[in-house]
Image: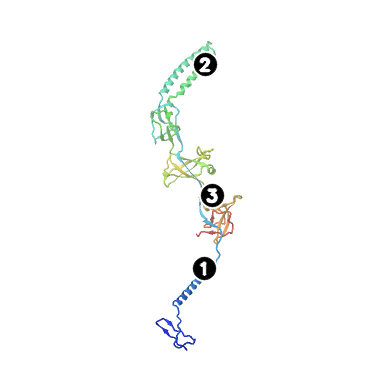
């Protein structure tokens, strides 16, 4: 049997060879460096691949969800209000724009903005000297026609003149009498307030003619500021909802976070064009303000007219209801825990600006529902939703 020898100098093992060779011949087989290390790395990679396979396979073994993706919302318990919201001007409940068609010079202005006046109070005096001259001439003519009439009447009674001559003298006298009485110097020498209230505008100027104001401009504006109103113009679609005595909440910049309150007091019987270049029709509506809380005339406000209110109602966002255009039936799609749909027929109650009331025994507070549903959805269908 051959001996095995180790050569430290070369790091090799002497391996025997059973082939007959001369005694003085030794055959050496060298083992390559790193072979064991490579084997170990290969085994490790195999083990890692196996572990990854064990991890992936169970995950891929579950079915992948399918179906259309839908946005969802929730059913809520809340108060739902149907309101018509529109802007308008705050003004005195009664107001007067004092104007004049005469051409008299203004000689004196007796009031200022902010003054309180009563009905019939003099606001300004006018220079009517020219009118007094005309009246004097008219009185002279009246005296002459009266003298002639009296004379003709006496002559007619004596048979000296015809009845026709006497009647002509009488007609001339009556005409001159009417002319003299028409001058009414007293009333024409002053401008009076037609209502009681507060002077809110004075556009008149001493020395100017009453008839020389700019088109549509009043000499004075008088308003009853103790009773305020708001005038709004409601469009054709919303006017059908407006009724006398409906409650109104009014907000305005002058009120800050506060509100004024009132009610619908008058609805115009006819509509009018929104503006000269528009075909849209609106209907004027007056709102009487009962609680001003500091609001003043001459400012704009936003009126919120309460049409209908439902307290503690089951409510959903406006876009959650699918209405069949043929039958008019309304449907809500509830998303169940397994992401399948349940189609629930509903009756719509009060419709607010963001939410509407739902009347149904099958819906509950917190139910998850489909938003903006389409006719492609159906009862029992599986859908995909975003995580809650």
Residue beneath the point at 43% across and 29% down: 212
Q: Are marks 2 and 1 in contact (CB under 8 Å)?
A: no
Q: Between 372 and 357, which is closer to the camera in this rendering?
A: 372
Name the side, left or right, on which 223 lies relative to 235.
left
Could you tell me which secondary element the residue under label 1 belongs to?
helix
Q: Between 5 and 198, which is closer to the camera in this rendering?
A: 5
Residue 248 in the image: x percent, y percent?
Answer: 48, 44
Q: Are marks 3 and 2 in contact (CB under 8 Å)?
A: no
Residue 81 in the image: x percent, y percent?
Answer: 51, 49
Q: Between 97 and 271, which is closer to the camera in this rendering?
A: 271
Callout 2 crowding tier (Cα within 10 Å): few <14, some 14–19, many ≥20? few
Q: Is residue 79 above or below residue 266?
A: below
| Real-space Cα separation, disc 3 to disc 1, in angstroms | 53 Å
Could you tell me which secondary element the residue under label 3 belongs to?
strand
Could you tell me which secondary element the residue under label 2 belongs to?
helix
Q: Which residue is mark 1?
A: 56
Name the side, left or right, on which 358 lies relative to 124.
right
Q: Is residue 375 above or below residue 233?
A: below
Q: Nearer the viewer, mark 2 or mark 1?
A: 1
Callout 3 crowding tier (Cα within 10 Å): few <14, some 14–19, many ≥20? some
| Real-space Cα separation, disc 3 to disc 2, in angstroms | 78 Å
Question: Outermost residue, right direction?
Answer: 327
Res 62 → quadrant: bottom right
Q: Earlier in the sequence, mark 2 or mark 1?
A: 1
Mark number, residue 350:
3
Residue beneath the point at 47% across and 21% down: 179
Q: Is residue 265 above or below residue 8?
A: above
Q: Nearer the viewer, mark 3 or mark 1?
A: 1
Q: Is residue 117 above or below residue 138?
A: below
Residue 199 in the image: x percent, y percent?
Answer: 41, 35
Q: Which residue is mark 2?
A: 168
């Amino acid at each position: 049997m051959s001996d095995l020898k180790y050569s430290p100098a070369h790091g090799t093992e002497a391996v025997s060879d059973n082939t007959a060779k001369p005694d003085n011949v030794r055959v050496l087989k060298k083992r390559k460096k790193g072979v064991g290390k490579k084997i170990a790395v290969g085994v490790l990679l195999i083990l890692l691949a196996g572990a990854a396979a064990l991890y992936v396979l169970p995950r891929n073994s579950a079915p992948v969800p399918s179906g259309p993706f839908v946005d969802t919302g929730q059913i809520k318990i809340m108060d739902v209000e149907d309101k018509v919201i529109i802007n308008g001007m705050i003004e005195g409940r009664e107001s007067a724009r004092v104007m004049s068609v005469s051409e008299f010079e203004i000689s004196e202005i007796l009031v200022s903005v902010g003054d309180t006046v009563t009905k019939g109070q003099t606001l300004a005096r006018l220079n009517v000297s020219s009118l007094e001259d005309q009246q004097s001439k008219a009185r002279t003519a009246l005296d002459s026609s009266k003298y002639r009439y009296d004379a003709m009447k006496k002559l007619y009674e004596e048979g000296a003149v015809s009845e026709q001559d006497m009647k002509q003298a009488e007609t001339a006298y009556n005409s001159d009498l009417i002319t003299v009485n028409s001058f009414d110097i007293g009333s024409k020498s002053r401008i009076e307030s037609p209502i009681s209230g507060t002077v809110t505008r004075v556009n008149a100027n001493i020395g100017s003619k009453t008839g020389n104001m700019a088109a549509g401009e009043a000499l004075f504006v008088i308003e009853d500021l103790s009773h305020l109103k708001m005038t709004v113009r409601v469009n054709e679609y919303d006017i059908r909802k407006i009724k006398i005595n409906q409650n109104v909440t009014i907000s305005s910049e002058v009120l800050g976070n506060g509100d004024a309150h009132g009610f619908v007091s008058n609805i115009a019987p006819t509509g009018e064009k929104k503006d000269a270049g528009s075909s849209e029709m609106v209907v004027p509506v007056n709102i009487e303000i009962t609680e001003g809380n500091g609001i003043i005339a001459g400012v704009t406000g936003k009126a919120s007219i309460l049409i209908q209110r439902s307290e503690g109602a089951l409510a959903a966002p406006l876009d959650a209801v699918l209405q069949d255009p043929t039958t008019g039936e309304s449907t809500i799609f509830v998303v169940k825990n397994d992401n399948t749909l349940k189609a629930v027929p509903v009756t719509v109650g009060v419709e607010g600006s963001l939410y509407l009331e739902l009347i149904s025994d099958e819906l509950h507070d917190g139910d998850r529902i489909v938003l903006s549903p389409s006719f492609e959805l159906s009862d029992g269908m599986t859908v995909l939703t975003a995580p809650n």
